[in-house]
Image (tube, coloured by chain):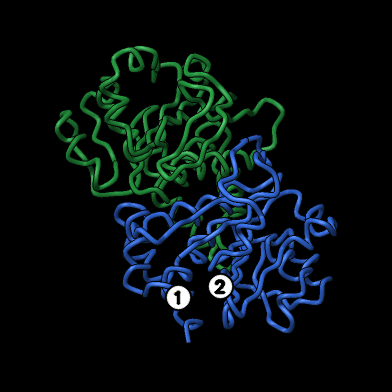
Chain colours: A green, B blue
Amino acid sequence: MRIAILTFEGYNELDSLIAFGILNRIQKPDWKVTLASPTVQVTSMNGVTLHAQASIEEACEADVVLIGSGSKTRDVVNDATLMARLKLDPKRQLIGAQCSGTLVLAKRGLLGSIPACTDLTTKPWVQEAGVDVLNQAFYAQGNIATAGGCLASQYLAFWVIARTIGLDTAKEALHYVAPVGEKEVYVTRALENIVPYLN
Amino acid sequence: MRIAILTFEGYNELDSLIAFGILNRIQKPDWKVTLASPTVQVTSMNGVTLHAQASIEEACEADVVLIGSGSKTRDVVNDATLMARLKLDPKRQLIGAQCSGTLVLAKRGLLGSIPACTDLTTKPWVQEAGVDVLNQAFYAQGNIATAGGCLASQYLAFWVIARTIGLDTAKEALHYVAPVGEKEVYVTRALENIVPYLN
C-alpha cells in the first residue's frame, strides 16, 4: 500500500505530519507512506524546510493520496501547470483532503456534488467553488474524504487505515498516539466520526 | 519570547511539530518558535529530513525549552557530550518534555522528586531513572511540565501559552487547530488538564 501526502510550499505542519505520523504506526513491509511535493524541498508556513520523499507524479500513482493544507493553497489552485500534474482518480485511489486541501479537490473537479469539510478560513473559498461545506470534522463518500481543523487529520489517517486494513488496526494506531489517560476517549470519538462513512 | 523545541535524530514528527504548529498560532513580533537540533539537519523516525532552525546552544538561551521525543532518545541520554550541552535551568526557563523527552529531563537531573508523564514505551526507562510516572496526559510543577502520548503535545503548547501570555490566548490557539465541531470539547479538556497546574 503506497500512501502519499501532498505537501506544498507553505504547508501546515500539523496537516501533513499528524496523518503521516499516525499512518506510519503501521509496520508492514508493503506499507509505505511518503510526503510528496512539487519540489525537492518545501518550507512550511512557519519556516520548517523539509525534504520531499516523493514527487507529485509518484504520488499520483499511489493507492492513497492525502492533500495537505497550507498558507499558499490559493497559489496552488491558481497554478494551472501544477494542477494539471495532479492526476488523481477516486476510481483507483482513496483520496483525502485536509483543511485547505479541500480547495484543491474542489478546483480539480473531484468533489462534484459531494459535500466537504474544511477549516473556517478556507470555507468561503470552497463554497465559492460550488461545494457545500459541512460544520463537522470529517466526511467521506465513496473513496473521497475531507477533514476540517488541523487536529482532524487524525480522522483522515484513521479512515485510511480502516479502509485499507481494518477498523481494529485503525483503533490500535490512534490508541498509541492518543494522550495517556484519554486513549479510549480518542478512539471512541474517531469511531463516531468515521464509522458512519465506512459503508 | 524565544521558544525552542529540541528535535533530535530519529525525532517523532507528532511530538515536535504539533507543539510547534500550535505555538506558532501566536502572532507577536517578539514571539519566536524554533526547532533546535544538534546538527543542521535531522531525520525523523519515519524518514523526514528537516533543517534545524536553531542550535542546541541557542535553545539553551531560550525562555522556553520543550524536549521532543523520538526513537533514539536512549542514544541521546547515553551521549555524555550532547547531554552536557543541554544547559537548561528551570529557575530561568519554562521547561517541558514530551514522551521520551521526559527521559532526557530525568537523566539530566532536572526532575528531582517531581513526578512525570511519558509514553507507555518510555515509562519503564523513566521509572528506572528514579522518577514516578503518572497515568495521565499532563503534569506540571513550577516551571517544569511533562506530557505523555503524542497528541498530548497540544497540552504542552497550551501550558506554554497560558504561562507566558494567558489562558484566553491559549484557548484561542487550541480552538483554531481543533477539529471543526469539536473545538469546545478540545478547549474544555485542555483546561481540565492544565488549569490545576497553573498556580
Q: Read off the chain for label 1.
A: B
Q: Name the residue under label 2.
A: B94
Q: How far apart are marks 2 and 1 (CA)?
A: 9 Å
Classify 10 Å Cα crowding around label 2: few (below 14), some (14-19), many (20 and above): many
Q: Mark 1 points at which residue?
A: B163
Q: Is residue A199 visible?
A: no
Q: Is mark 2 on a helix, strand or loop?
A: strand
Q: In this view, does A112 lie above or below B183?
A: above
* Image location (x, y in percent) of residue A12: 41, 42
Q: In this view, does B76 lie above or below A199?
A: below
Q: Which part of the image, by quadrant, shows the N terminus of chain A?
A: top right
Q: Is residue B173 visible?
A: yes
Q: What element carries label 1?
A: helix
Classify 10 Å Cα crowding around label 1: few (below 14), some (14-19), many (20 and above): some
Q: Do the residues labelled 2 and 1 touch (CB within 8 Å)?
A: yes
Q: What residue type is labelled 2?
A: Leu
* Image location (x, y in percent) of residue B6: 63, 55
Please state which of residues B165 and A80 is positioned toward the viewer in this rendering.
B165
Q: Which amino acid does label 1 sit on?
A: Arg
* Image location (x, y in percent) of residue B50: 59, 38
- Quadrant of residue B133 in the image? bottom right
**Residue A54 disc label:** none
* Image location (x, y in percent) of residue A143: 39, 27
Name the residue at 19% across, 35% down.
A125
Q: Mark 2 or mark 1: name the one nearer the start of the chain.
A: 2
- Which residue appears farthest toward the bottom when viewing the image? B199
- Quadrant of residue B113 in the image? bottom right
